[in-house]
Amino acid sequence: MSIGEALAQARHQAGLTVTQVSHRTRIRETIITGIEGDDYAACGGDFYARGHIRSIAGVVGADPEPLIRQYDAAQPGPEAITEDDVAQPVASGGMRERRRLNWIAALVLVLAVGLGFVAYHLFTVSRQGTSAAPGSRVLPVTHRHTTHGSPAPTPKTTTPAVVPARTLAPASAAAFDPDGTGEGDNSDFAHLAIDGNPATAWRSDWYTTAHFGNLYPGTGLLVDMGRSVTITAAQISLGRARGAVFQLRVGAGRSLADLPPVARAADASGVVHLRLTTPAHGRYVLIWFTSLPLDPAGTYQASVYGLQLEGQP
């Protein structure tokens, strides 16, 4: 029995359609149909074909290891992964992948401009804190007239009270899909990231590369605070594997465009502390992963064991 026949048979026995398998594996239906017909042209190379076979087998309840060995035995030899191989899944994905790559390029440009503005602002504030620049506005000293040598009363000044930050309790959490379809990675387990139990976690799907097999711009966890709040700091507990790259985004809407980034971390693992330079206001908080760490199984996956937010309700 061929690989495609074995996977198709297992899918029928599991009572799943190609569409359902596509939703669970994040693999396009055309690729799944091709693999079931023993056509791997749309996979983009042996590396991705093995990953797709393993992912599909895991969903339909088949043992992937014999299928991988059968696939390797049918190949003429090991295939080196080249730049063309990495680019191929994007080309085979059509306009949807190209639009995503264009979107990523635009986001990188916007982030670069934003970082430049923040650096300039911090430098300017530092200069102003040490000396008054030429031409800076200086408020004149006002003298009050007195009579017969009586001392002028000392003006009273008041300092605004600083309101201490409080721990903010999230109302709910859901996996975030960049397409907005509501089919994010393992959404049924999203609540485990905010349940207060350090032993439980939400995990993304696993992918064949750190950048989601060039299929998606990212994946994430969307937290609903239940009302608009002000956030000044965050503590995010990740898995032990280093290499996660993510943004903390806060806003009033549930789409990526409505959630501007307010902090970011790179090569992250364990407990990550983020202190916002400017308080962020909004109802929704998104932990948006743009690169995943390598797990012990040789695939790429992100985990969030806990989230603590500080600010004002």
Image (cartoon, rainbow, N blue to C red):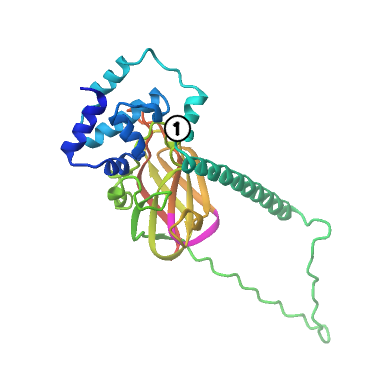
Residue 250 is left or right of residue 300, and the answer is right
**Image coords of residue 212 (percent x, y):** 42, 36
Quadrant (top left, top right, bottom left, bottom right) of the C terminus? bottom left
In magenta stretch: residue 282: yes
| Label 1 sits on residue | 89
Task: Indicate the quadrant where residue 149 lies.
Answer: bottom right
**Image coords of residue 220 (percent x, y):** 41, 47
User: In the picture shown, does residue 234 fall above or below 90?
Assistant: below
In this rendered view, identify the residue nearer to me: 283 or 211.
Answer: 211
In this rendered view, identify the residue nearer to me: 118 or 25.
Answer: 25
Task: Indicate the quadrant where residue 203 lies.
Answer: top left
**Image coords of residue 291 (percent x, y):** 46, 38
The amino acid type of the residue labelled 1 equals Pro
In magenta stretch: residue 168: no
Quadrant (top left, top right, bottom left, bottom right) of the N terminus? top left
Report the magenta stretch's main SS: strand
**Image coords of residue 166 (percent x, y):** 42, 61
Outermost residue, top side: 76
Q: Is residue 61 in view from this perspective?
A: no
Considering the numbered disc 1 on the image, is that residue within a helix, a strand or a loop? Answer: helix
Query: Which residue is painted at 39% across and 49% down in the image?
Result: 177
Residue 236 is left or right of residue 154, and the answer is left
Q: Is residue 254 in view from this perspective?
A: yes
Outermost residue, bottom side: 147
User: In the picture shown, does residue 274 fall above or below 72?
Assistant: below
Query: Which residue is painted at 62% across and 49% down in the image?
Result: 114
Task: Indicate the quadrant where residue 150 lies.
Answer: bottom right
For the record, the magenta segment spans: 277-285
Instruction: Count neighbours of disc 1 (C-alpha within 10 A) and say few if under 14, some if 14 to 19, many if 20 or more.
Output: some
